Amino acid sequence: MKNLVILDNPLVKRDVTILRDKLTNSKDFRAALDRVSYSLVIEIAKSFELVEHEVETPLEITKGFKFRKQIVLVPVLRAGLSMVSSFLEMIPDAKVGHIGLQRDEKTLQPIDYYYKTPNKLGESLTILLDPMLATGGSAVASFNSLKEKGANNCILACLISAPEGVDKMFVEHPSVPIYTAAYDRQLNKNGYILPGLGDAGDRTFGTY
Ligand code: PRP
Ligand code: URA
């Protein structure tokens, strides 16, 4: 599907299984989520534009590379926080913004409670981090806010996505590539992804 990259990697499939398993405790859940996040950042980085420059080794001058754009990571609170450390470990000079959204349990509409991103989003590559793309309401609202602040080169990184959320992103933000570790079947009547992994925030932070 155009603009949807589904990771195809045995390491990821094994770890997504650990994440799905209702018997996995928060400690093991966070560890598996870290590992999948590493695979996501490695896949996403294949699309980064590079600029060549000279580097002097102890022996001679050769060709080196740096990223063309500043990378800005934006986790969606709370569950997105769990993806930050892996991304930052691989991109230590990334800047980090935060968007606070809470899905209303009845209407499923996102309610925003926090927004803070670095300046100059227009010159950056902005990567939104959120493990779950369900109805797509939170991702669409996040990109609406980011684009209002000037972001024009954006990527969505998630663990599990549902067709409903992917379709909504294709309509509302067709220029944003989506990278996902798994593309699941559907939503249930409460807006949870099936088969999914349950509530990502609760399972990460043990709030159940
Ligand atoms: C979860 C998840 C996404 C959102 C996805 O967050 O982390 O942000 O739901 O659902 P959507 O695609 O239907 O908008 P939640 O609102 O449960 O908040 P939390 O991270 O604080 O648990
Ligand atoms: N948010 C979650 O944490 N899980 C879902 O399945 C849907 C939204």
Image (cartoon, rainbow, N blue to C red):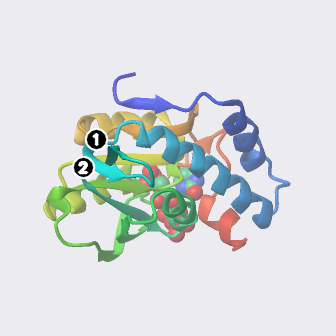
The location of residue 51, given as percent across then percent down, is 24, 45
Identify the disc placed on residue 68.
2
Q: Residue at x 23, y 62 (%)?
A: 145
Query: 186 or 204, which lies in front?
Result: 204
Is 197 positioned to the left or the right of 75 in the image?
right
Q: In the picture, which quadrant includes the N terminus?
A: top left
Question: Alpha-carbon neighbours of circle 2 within 10 Å: few (<14), some, or many (≥20)?
Answer: some
Question: Alpha-carbon neighbours of circle 1 within 10 Å: few (<14), some, or many (≥20)?
Answer: few
**SS of the residue under disc 1:** loop
The location of residue 108, given as percent across then percent down, is 44, 57
Q: Residue at x 70, y 62 (%)?
A: 30
Q: In the picture, which quadrant includes the C terminus?
A: bottom right
**Residue identified by numbered label 1:** 49
Cβ–Cβ below 8 Å for labels 1 and 2? Answer: yes
Is 68 positioned to the left or the right of 47 in the image?
left
Q: Furthest-right residue in view?
A: 23
